[in-house]
Amino acid sequence: MSSAKELGERKIIKLILNCLDQMPNMPLPFGDDASAVDLGDNKLAVINMDMLVRKTDVPKAMSHWQAARKAIIMNISDLAAKGAKPVVLLASIGVPEELTKTEIIEIGKGLNSGAREYGAYILGGDTNQASDLIISCMALGLCSKNNLLKRSGAKAGDYVAVTGAFGKTTCGLKILLDGLFAPEIQSELVDSVFMPKARVQEGLVLAQSKAVTASIDVSDGLAWSLHELSKVNNVGFSLDNLPVAPEVERFADVFGFDWVDLALYGGEEYELLVTVKPELWQKAAKAIETVGGSLTKIGVVTKEKNIALKLDEKTVRVEPRGWEHFKTE
Amino acid sequence: MSSAKELGERKIIKLILNCLDQMPNMPLPFGDDASAVDLGDNKLAVINMDMLVRKTDVPKAMSHWQAARKAIIMNISDLAAKGAKPVVLLASIGVPEELTKTEIIEIGKGLNSGAREYGAYILGGDTNQASDLIISCMALGLCSKNNLLKRSGAKAGDYVAVTGAFGKTTCGLKILLDGLFAPEIQSELVDSVFMPKARVQEGLVLAQSKAVTASIDVSDGLAWSLHELSKVNNVGFSLDNLPVAPEVERFADVFGFDWVDLALYGGEEYELLVTVKPELWQKAAKAIETVGGSLTKIGVVTKEKNIALKLDEKTVRVEPRGWEHFKTE
């Protein structure tokens, strides 16, 4: 009999989804970044739930404030990718016996900060005894039915674009977990892990622009997210650009990593990956600028299901893998 | 420095709530059974989140199907107490490595059954590696703003009433955890733990009746819930009736327990405790009958903050304690 360890997360999710009756007329299908409920009058509630487990999701050097804030950001990012405005969150906390009063207060403050940064509020939740610190949050956002961004909808010829540069969290995690030390760029890279940002404003203006045909958040890494969009839309991607932060190139140089690998096979970056109607590209890019963000074209959608990245120096096949959950013990 | 173990659940929740900015015009205050968001047009989304942890919430003899179903019922019961109709749920599951494929499928089926029993659907969720099985669920229900039932609103003179009899789960837990054996009534009592029911229809018709002034679900035990209502409303209760199942009286007889204690200081019974305008008592009682339930008057609300129960044989002071979370290891 297979155990959870052998099955892996994707198969476990599939097994569970197979047991569920499907609600008629679901605005978002199973397996999208979030779920949605039709409230009538062209209004949707977009809801999402994500659990942070200290052992697997929180590097030892991360504070309780940061961990709690991150538990909120993880959830808000999924709403951002659907074009929904985060409104309220709940937090359910599994509390190990030895957690101190100071740490509990840090968690409360981190939850509040994460929500308030994006204009949302924590409305409540509960706590339970648990053997490891667990912060399970749910977020509820609102969007008009016409503005909902789904993973499905990409067509051959659409542009592929991202809201930021990649690779920083991968480097940051390597520093935190493997003990690498990169003096000048250390704090910038580690901060990307400790203080993730969700692209809420970007998601909202992209949704309003009507330029986006498909959207996903890149919390599982760029390569993985590209493969998800490829599967859902039965398309491929021909990529010719891969935005990375200068710190990532530097880090790759110093430690002998391939910067392309660092950027493709990362995770927990919370950028948005979208496909855009070519004729509305300018509109989308300008909309993002109005909120202080940027939209970078990285390629086009293709009929062939390959995902290839052609850079000056080389062409690589983008593989369907991401950052593997780290084990600290 | 105090640890979580010394602080206890109530103080931990208080510490966290103190860190949170309060959303303006919250339809339900912090600390009510659930939270609510105003959707406009006299509509509210009522949301709730509750976490089931195997070690502390699931007796060993309970199946994975039952545990998953219970995780759903816990959440639905809180919506019921607010007069909201459950619509959708999400489930976030912490999966220990050794969980088998069969157990995972059982969990999926239990989640689905719990939701479908009450006309709701599971829309999604996520899974994570964890050291113990954790099933964290959120439920979203809808109700009209006028129909929302709160913990606050009880006035001296109102009737106090409940939707069922008490004590069965307390006996069931004593059987499961202390190994007591009560042949003929065993399965009835154990089933009350394994197969809890939420009073959704009862909550809905009570809300529509406009007869209810305050409402709480009795998941923490009748005595505890009475004290919660007492605190929130600054009132007391003069009780003269305490409905118990015949199996509970029998169990008390056989093992030498006080049946009043079994009924008062239990937990996880998911009945509703409400206060009702005396002039609308008949309306409320009839409304409940239309959905096959029953409403039993147990006393009246008093100005004095005492909570006293006067039965034929004795008068007891109802203490502010409930079933303590059991520790199986």
Image: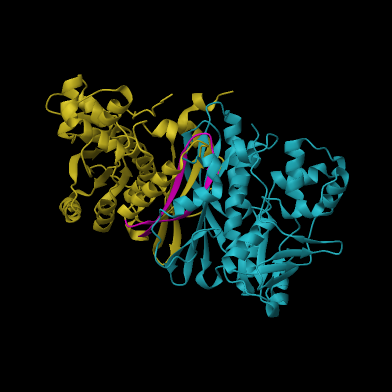
Chain colours: A yellow, B cyan
Left or right of A283 in this view: A132:
right
A188 and B164: which is toward the camera: A188
Examine the rendering and report whether any part of residue A70 can be seen: yes
Magenta residues, dominant SS class: strand
- In this rendering, does residue B151 appear at all? no
- Residue at the bottom extreme? B279
Q: Is residue A107 left or right of residue A188?
A: right
Q: Position of residue B11 (x, y in %)?
A: 52, 50
Residue A251 x, y percent position in the rendering: 19, 26
Write the start and end of the magenta stretch as one range: A119-143
Give coordinates of residue B120: x percent, y percent.
57, 54
Left or right of A304: which side holds A88? right
Looking at this view, name the residue that lies furthest to the front. Answer: B1
Is B237 rendered above or below residue A62?
below
Is A140 one of the magenta-colored residues? yes
Vertical comparison of B96 with A118: above or below: above
For the image, the number of numbered tags is 0
Quarter of the image holding residue A101?
top left
> Looking at this rendering, what residue extends furthest in the left direction?
A312
Residue at horizontal 62 percent and vertical 50 percent from the top: B73
* Along the line of sight, the residue nearer the viewer: A61 or B163: A61
**Where B274 sits versus B71, above or below?**
below
Residue B204 image point, x, y percent: 61, 66
B113 over B28 or under it: above or below = above
Quadrant for residue B66, please give it: top right
